[in-house]
Image: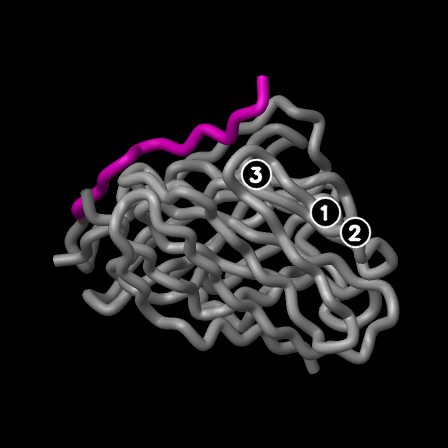
């Protein structure tokens, strides 16, 4: 199994809603990542979990809250988002150091209305 | 600091033409890794290749080939006999062992359009 699975694929939410994005991998990777990607831009790193602990937070606003319940799962909890948060949210995983490259999921296209 | 520059924003070719995507990088690390990813319109980023800084051998995989030159800090990607299915955004990325350890720096991407 060499996939990273993200759900949902599409999400429309209001600015007062609470929603969660989910990511799952079964490759035994010990590092997992959340990226945000706006149209025609490269992915921007948001968070890195290494061995289930948050190791990097790229100064992301607190309306985004990551969670890593176990080594296979990664969640991103969303609350009180703004329209400018609309983007493609990509989950990725890698062997611990990231030196072997990332396996990305197909992403969640989020629209905040 | 680390930086990846993909100077070509968009490239358009006709099917069966060869095309080269340029990537120039900057890093102070002596040990680092370079990557190419493909992002088709569906959105998923697909890993294509990894190179470490000590391995300057060029690599060929089918119609794809990569030329890594430390002397010019470049890691260029050539598609031979391009096909419509090659149309995508291609990102070059860099991971240093010491600088920004644990995360990759991406270039801005090159949008390749292959016309039939």
Q: CA distance from mark 3 to mark 1?
A: 15 Å
Query: Does dot 3 land on a helix, a strand or a loop?
Result: strand
Q: Name the residue carrying label 2.
A: B57
B116 left or right, relative to B13: left
- Is A2 magenta? The answer is yes
- Is B108 magenta? The answer is no
Q: CA distance from mark 1 to mark 2?
A: 31 Å
Specify the subunit that label 2 lies on.
B
Residue A64 versus residue A11: which sits nearer the camera? Answer: A11
Residue B102 point in image, percent of width and height: 72, 58
Q: Name the residue carrying label 1.
A: A50
Q: Residues within 10 Å of mark 2 (few under 14, many from 20)?
A: few
Residue A76 is at least partly visible in this image: no
Disc marking residue A103: 3
Q: Nearer the viewer, mark 2 or mark 3?
A: 2
Query: Does dot 2 land on a helix, a strand or a loop?
Result: loop
Residue appearing at x 48%, y 72% in the figure: B6
Q: Residue furthest left?
A: A113
Q: Which range of residues does the magenta coloring cover? A: A1-12
Quarter placement of the N terminus of chain A: top right
Residue B89 versus residue B71: which sits nearer the camera? Answer: B71
Residue A53 point in image, percent of width and height: 71, 48
Query: Does dot 1 land on a helix, a strand or a loop?
Result: strand
A3 is higher (above) or lower (below) than A34: above
Specify the subunit that label 1 lies on.
A
Q: Are marks 3 and 1 on the same chain?
A: yes
Q: Residues within 10 Å of mark 1 (few under 14, many from 20)?
A: many
Q: Are marks 1 and 2 on the same chain?
A: no
B5 is higher (above) or lower (below) than B16: below
Q: Residues within 10 Å of mark 3 (few under 14, many from 20)?
A: many
């Amino acid at each position: 199994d060499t996939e990273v699975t993200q759900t949902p694929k599409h999400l429309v939410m209001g600015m007062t809603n609470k929603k969660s994005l989910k990511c799952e991998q079964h490759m035994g990777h010990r590092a997992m990542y959340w990226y945000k990607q706006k149209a025609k831009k490269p992915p921007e790193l948001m968070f890195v979990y290494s061995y289930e602990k948050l190791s990097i937070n790229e100064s992301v606003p607190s309306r985004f809250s990551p969670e890593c319940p176990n080594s296979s799962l990664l969640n991103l909890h969303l609350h009180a988002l703004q329209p400018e948060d609309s983007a493609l949210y990509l989950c990725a995983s890698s062997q611990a150091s990231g030196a072997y490259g990332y396996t990305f999921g197909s992403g969640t296209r989020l629209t905040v209305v | 600091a680390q930086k990846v520059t993909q100077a070509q924003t968009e490239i358009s070719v006709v099917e069966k033409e060869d095309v080269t995507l340029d990537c120039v990088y900057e890093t102070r690390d002596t040990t680092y890794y370079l990557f190419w990813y493909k992002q088709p319109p569906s959105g998923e980023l697909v890993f294509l290749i990894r190179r470490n800084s000590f391995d300057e051998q060029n690599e060929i995989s089918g119609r794809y080939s990569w030329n890594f030159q430390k002397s010019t800090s470049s890691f260029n990607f050539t598609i031979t006999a391009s096909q419509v299915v090659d149309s995508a955004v291609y990102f070059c990325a860099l991971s240093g062992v010491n600088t920004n350890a644990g995360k990759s720096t991406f270039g801005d991407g090159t949008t390749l359009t292959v016309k039939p």
